Amino acid sequence: MKRTRKVICIATSFVLALNFAAGLVFYLFEPESVRSDPAASAPFSSNNGVIYLDQSWSESDRDTWYWIPQGTVVTSYDIFLNLECADSQELFRSDANIERYGLTPCPTNPATNPDGLPIGVTKEVTTEGRWKGVDAGINCAACHNSELFYQGKRIRIDGDVGMHFQIQAFFHAVDDAMQATLHDSAKFDRLTARIGASTSDAKSELRERFGRDAERIHYYMNRILVTPHEWGPGRIDALNLIINREVTIGPKIPENWFVSLAPVKPPFCGMHRRGRGRNGAALRKIRSAVTSVKPSAFTCPWT
């Protein structure tokens, strides 16, 4: 067992070092083809009252940052879209509920955000292989994006410290909603109707799939994301959660678990050429951590 743990630790260190090195190369030698068009990055006000700063990103860059999948899995996508809050019939993904936990809601856009997902919540599509399916996940933008509110306007700061997002409370709320639906036949029936599972076979498949997702999330919240105190808004122990993901959940060695005791503010991600290089390094580091084994509940980059 000790030898196995040593090998896992060495392999994890090697993967992280390799990806940091790749990020450094990208940071120093970012190709011209991936840079934004300065002419497309002027600040503007949207129809929904949001003022976007001039951060040298085009609208396309911004949309990619908000919703690019990064290999994470929270729950099946159709379940996330139709899940109710634990204590009401309000949809969990409603703008009002999402804002309770500090995520930023966004309007529907047929081209880039057809389901009206908040910033940082993604649609992960796996077309083949063992993990084939469509899942809801989260990406870097969930914790690296913020807004200021002034005289009815929302001033968007892309890549900023996510000062409002209460990630731990958000995860607990997902777990509560899943458990409530699992044990409340009326809630599950409403979920079934929204998803359109009308036949007995479809209902059985949904029940089995929902049960697997609920069990995984409940385990994570009650075995991995256990802390002596709530982190609060804008705080997360990302490093220790990544390591727990690598040495505890992935290899299925619960004895390797250790409590995440160092919640800090996520750093500002630079929105310029070299800043995007650093972001690219982080993305590669995250993907290496979460795709080496089956993505478990809340695996990016924090979990």
Image: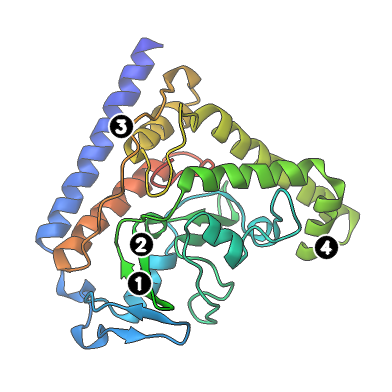
Distance from Cα at disc 1 to Cα at disc 3 = 36 Å
Q: Amino acid at mark 4?
A: Ala
Q: Mark 2 and 4 residues: CB-CB less than 8 Å, in contact?
A: no
Q: Which mark is residue 156?
A: 1
Instruction: Assess disc 3: are there few (<14), some (14-19) or many (≥20) residues with their C-alpha within 10 Å of its C-alpha.
Output: some
Residue 123: give x, y in percent of width and height: 53, 62
Q: Amino acid at mark 1?
A: Arg
Q: Quadrant of the C terminus?
A: top left
Image height check: is 178 above or below 12? Answer: below
Image height check: is 272 above or below 137? Answer: below
Tag in front: 2 or 3: 2
Residue assigned mark 3: 12
Q: Is residue 87 left or right of residue 115?
A: right
Instruction: Assess disc 2: are there few (<14), some (14-19) or many (≥20) residues with their C-alpha within 10 Å of its C-alpha.
Output: many
Residue assigned mark 4: 193
Tag in front: 2 or 4: 2
- Judge whether residue 271 can be spotted in this image: yes
Element carrying mark 3: helix
Q: Nearer the viewer, residue 151 or 233?
A: 151
Distance from Cα at disc 2 to Cα at disc 1 = 8 Å
